[in-house]
Image (cartoon, rainbow, N blue to C red):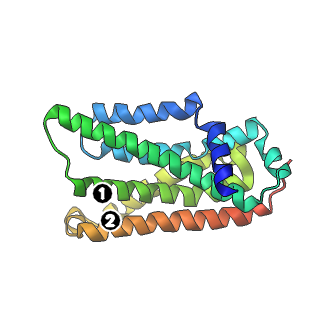
Amino acid sequence: MTFAFTKLDLMSWFPRRQTLLPLAFIVVVGIVLPVPGMAIAASAFVTSLMLSGPFLGDERDHLDTLYGILPISRRVVVVGRTLSILIYGVVAMFIATVTTLSVAAVRGTSVAPEFLGLGYAAAFAIIGISIGVQLPVLFRIGYSRGRLMVYAPTLLIAGAAWLAQTTGAIDGDAIGAIPPALGLGACVAVGVLGIVIGTITAVRLYSTRELR
């Protein structure tokens, strides 16, 4: 049932122009800023910004009312929506990878697989944080009242980086000294925690929401 809802969910919002145009933005970033990793970073932030898109469709097309009528649980809706967002993220990162490798080939340079791995892990962490922060709010109060939450993950990450730099808690040498495997593992852990916590919290909050 969850996968069936995921398919239905993707069909309702993925083919829309406002959903596909941000994917083109990833290509533009990769070409205009041909620094390895920029397109992958863009894919993470595009996914974060697009996370609220399906909820806009819910309100505009009154799909919340439909979800309340269909013989599916609130948990299925939340988990299915989470999976559809992750699928969008995978598509975004695939486009970012193709762009990165294509630009590198044109410029006659190469991109180390280890670098790509760290880029994917960092992007996954950003997406996980975005799901953890946005999903519960959007499922509880909807798009109209919760749309400003789309900026919360970016502000949170930027604020944490600024605070760490200002206080000297983390410097460039310290970051450079972190073993790649440890950095990759930490990013994956952050991403998984964000997704799990965000999904569980969203299920609990959505179960108490009155759909009309």
- Which residue is found at the position 84% from the left and 55% from the top? 210
Is disc 1 surrounded by few (<14), some (14 to 19) or many (20+) residues within 10 Å? some
1 and 2 marks in contact (CB < 8 Å):
yes
Q: Where is residue 93 in the image (x, y as percent from the top left)?
A: 40, 46
- Give, as a three-letter code, the residue at label 1: Gly
- In this rendering, is residue 13 above or below 172? above
Q: Position of residue 74 (x, y in %)?
A: 75, 59
Q: How many marks?
A: 2
Identified at 31% across, 61% down, the residue is: 165
Q: Quadrant of residue 66?
A: top right
User: In which quadrant of the rendered view does residue 137 lie?
Assistant: bottom right
| Residue tagged 2 | 184
Q: Earlier in the sequence, mark 1 or mark 2?
A: 1
| The N terminus sits in image quarter | bottom right
For image coordinates 42% across by 33% down, the residue present is 25
Residue drawn at point x = 82 percent, y = 50 percent: 70
- Eyeballing the image, is 141 above or below 30? below
Hey, what amino acid is under mark 2?
Leu
Helix, strand or loop at label 2? It is: helix
Where does label 1 land, which residue? Answer: 117
Q: In this view, does 126 lie to the left or right of 165?
A: right
